[in-house]
Image: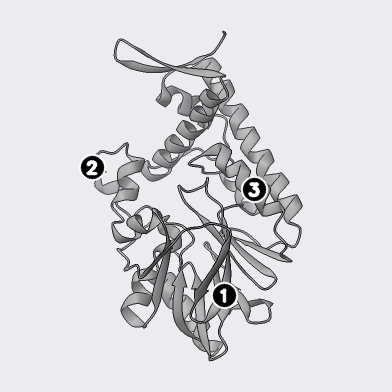
Amino acid sequence: MKNLVELAPHTYYLPGSVNVGVIATADGGAILVDSGADKNHGRTLRKALQAAGLEPRALVNTHAHADHYGGNDYFVRNFEVSVWAPSFEEAILRYPYLEPMYLFGGAAPPPALQNKWLMGKPSRVDHVYTPDEGTLEVAGVLLNVHPMSGHAVVQAAIGYGSVCFAADAFFGAEVLAKYEVPFTHNVPQQLASLERLADLPYEVFVPGHGEPTRDIQRAVELNRQYIFRALDLVRQAVREADTTSDIVHALTARLESPPENLSTYVLMHSCVLAYLAYLVELGEVVPVVEKGTLKWVVNTA
């Protein structure tokens, strides 16, 4: 059985494919930061909480990617927990169909995309918070909230004491090496969030995926390197191809682990579009529609 790992007094995390933060209250309660990917993750977390003598009281979601809120349904059905979610993202927790739908370009997604990795079970949301710099009182505990959008449309990092639960504002080194192209919704926002993260006054930073670190400067720099490497790969792909699908193919052909199913493909497709949008913003690429075909063209002006 997995046990909670203590990071600081009253502050823990449950390591796994998705890290879940746990903040203990003075009366034996627990505030969860995210809930994992599914009910199995929820059960594992419940057992770890029981072993530590803690009872879940509240659940604070950092963003609405299914691997971070998939355990919500389990806790909502089995415990009296209040659920907190960021503005905008709370709509996806209520209506999980939105995630595979937007990844599929707004059309009705095929069954292969309606899976637990892209669409968790619906979750009740009791409190909607705006991830601005400030505090949030949850179950009698004051938590620090920091805006960390970019990876998701809206994302928050949650701080307590000397620990920052950073969600997917950054990824651990082993995760970056495995996936090579960090998923992003908005590249400049993701870069700006990394800069803010590097300035936060915490001792321990817990990513959503990967090992906690006490050297956030090094972690931020490594994440920046992977983002700029991905940007260069997209630049190179645009010089070799012009349609979105061909650009995706040109990029993934250079990866050690290219997408091998529809779910990983649409995630990569969406990510490449985010990088293309950033290149348009930088003035390096121009979108052109010719005879019904969208092409991405290097700007020579």
Q: How far is disc 2 from disc 1 in space, using C-alphas?
A: 41 Å
Residue marked by disc 2: 108
100 to 272, vertically: above or below = below
Residue that protrudes farthest toward the top in the picture: 301
* Camera-side residue of 31 and 131: 131
Q: Find residue 194 and name its label.
A: 3
* Callout in the foreground (1, 3): 1
Q: How far is disc 2 from disc 3 in space, using C-alphas?
A: 34 Å
Q: Amino acid at mark 1?
A: Leu
Residue 208 found in image quarter = bottom right
214 sits left or right of 169 in the view? right
- Badge 3 marks a residue whose secondary structure is helix
124 sits left or right of 242 in the view? left
Badge 2 density bin: few <14, some 14–19, many ≥20, Cα 10 Å: some
Q: Amino acid at mark 3?
A: Leu
* Callout in the foreground (2, 1): 1
* Camera-side residue of 67 and 129: 129
Q: Earlier in the sequence, mark 1 or mark 3?
A: 1
Residue occupying the point 37% across, 59% down: 90
Q: Earlier in the sequence, mark 2 or mark 1?
A: 2
- Badge 2 marks a residue whose secondary structure is loop
* Camera-side residue of 123 and 85: 85
Residue marked by disc 1: 142
Q: Amino acid at mark 2?
A: Ala
